[in-house]
Amino acid sequence: MEFRIALLPGDGIGPDVLEQAVKVLKAIGNRYNHSFQFTEYLVGGVAIDQVGQPLPPETIDGCLTSDSVILGAVGGPKWDDLPGDQRPEAALLGLRGKLGLYANLRPAVLHNALRDACPLRPDIASKGIDIMVVRELTGGMYFGDRGRRQGPMGQEAWDTECYSVEEVERIARTAFEIAMKRKKKVTNVDKANVLESSRLWRSIVLEVAKDYPEVELDHLYVDNASMQLIRIPHEFDVLVTTNMFGDILSDEASMITGSIGMLPSASLGKGKLGMYEPIHGSAPDIAGQDKANPIATILSVAMMFRYSFDLEEEATAIENAVTKVLEARYRTGDIMSEGMTLVGTKKMGDLIVEAL
Ligand code: NAD
């Protein structure tokens, strides 16, 4: 098959880790007979420096005419004093909106070889962790009405949580579809005991569930969910929730699996076009020093094969190659421990290509 891939390296370690992801893509191309046409576009601080804005129109057009998008990371101290809407990070919201990416998928997997990095008790960690957090990405409180006003007790501020039936329906469907490819269990997380928006949310999730009789569905209030993630993480499969709850719970889920340098993500919309990126930032402290862990970006490429291209074998091959290299005791600095072999960004990329 032939694929057009938009590459958005961005800032800091973005280019370092993206280079390794491209190596892995080329290796997959050779092994499975796919060809890739790569085009690089500007995004983030580097785009501000070169063309005066964090998300140039050419980048949006380039992404929209590609089969998929891979992003490194954006941001850095150089651009920290710019106003919010002109900062590199504004490009991320812009891309999600322009590409219509309403579903954010963040897997939290505890690799056997990295079990020591899990901050939970060994008897809990030993049961394994493999959770997919499905977070709504373009609605809710982060996009709702907000403002400030003068109230009886002085100045007040408000933000609004608002969800339409359509917004809930499409994210619920995404979660059930993903569950069908996994262990067929969905946990819906809301606050239906207090919030009207959550009551609508839950009723729609229940409606959508009727189309997926094979999938087991349960519901947790968000406060309880945050406790159960720590107490019984092995009992979760797919967790679906709102933009704000998902923001918080996906960070909690990823923390229990160890290093930030290991965690991939996917943002999906209606069609096949998706944006794939590591969850970490641009790590300016180690940029360009061959120290960044490229695994999060490489695992994001695996997600791209699974969710945008429906090529499960290629996705699994990448994930197995990563596991093999970790089991061979190779580590980048962020996941280094005694008795392991320390390698740099490039070497880690090469080892994963070799394992493929
Ligand atoms: P960060 O994720 O960049 O770094 C946090 C810490 O983790 C640092 O010590 C860093 O060295 C380490 N780290 C991160 N990724 C690593 C990797 N792959 N390998 C090894 N170590 C890694 O978060 P931050 O320091 O809060 O933010 C730095 C910049 O990145 C800021 O400008 C922030 O706004 C931006 N940011 C961008 C994104 C994104 O592009 N999606 C996400 C978060 C933060």
Image (cartoon, rainbow, N blue to C red):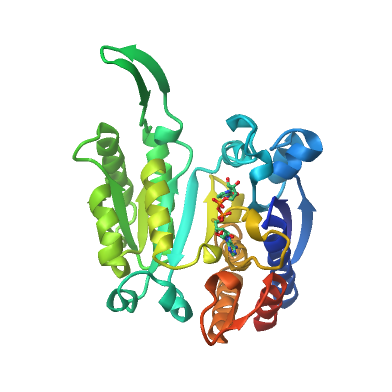
User: Which quarter of the rendering shows the N terminus?
Assistant: bottom right
- Residue 103: give x, y in percent of width and height: 48, 47
Q: Nearer the viewer, residue 307 or 76?
A: 76
Q: Nearer the viewer, residue 314 or 326?
A: 326
Q: Is residue 309 visible?
A: yes
Q: Quadrant of ligand 1?
A: bottom right
- In the displayed structure, 245 sits above or below 343; it is above
- In the displayed structure, 21 sits above or below 81; it is below
Q: Give the image quarter of residue 197.
A: top left
In this picture, residue 138 sits left or right of residue 11: left
- Residue 67: give x, y in percent of width and height: 68, 52
> What residue lies at 72% left-to-right and 72% top-to-bottom?
346
- In the displayed structure, 80 sits above or below 343; it is above
Q: Give the image quarter of residue 294.
A: bottom right
Residue found at the very far left of the displayed protein: 193
- Residue 65: give x, y in percent of width and height: 72, 45
Residue found at the very far right of the displayed protein: 50
> What residue lies at 60% left-to-right and 37% top-to-bottom?
90
In this picture, residue 136 sits left or right of residue 301: left
In this picture, residue 141 sits left or right of residue 188: right
Q: Give the image quarter of residue 13.
A: bottom right
Q: Is residue 221 visible?
A: no
Q: Nearer the viewer, residue 355 or 292?
A: 292
User: Which quarter of the rendering shows the C terminus?
Assistant: bottom right
> What residue lies at 61% left-to-right and 62% top-to-bottom?
297
> What residue lies at 38% left-to-right and 40% top-to-bottom?
168
In this picture, residue 70 sits left or right of residue 130: right
The mark total stands at: 0
- Residue 355: give x, y in percent of width and height: 65, 82
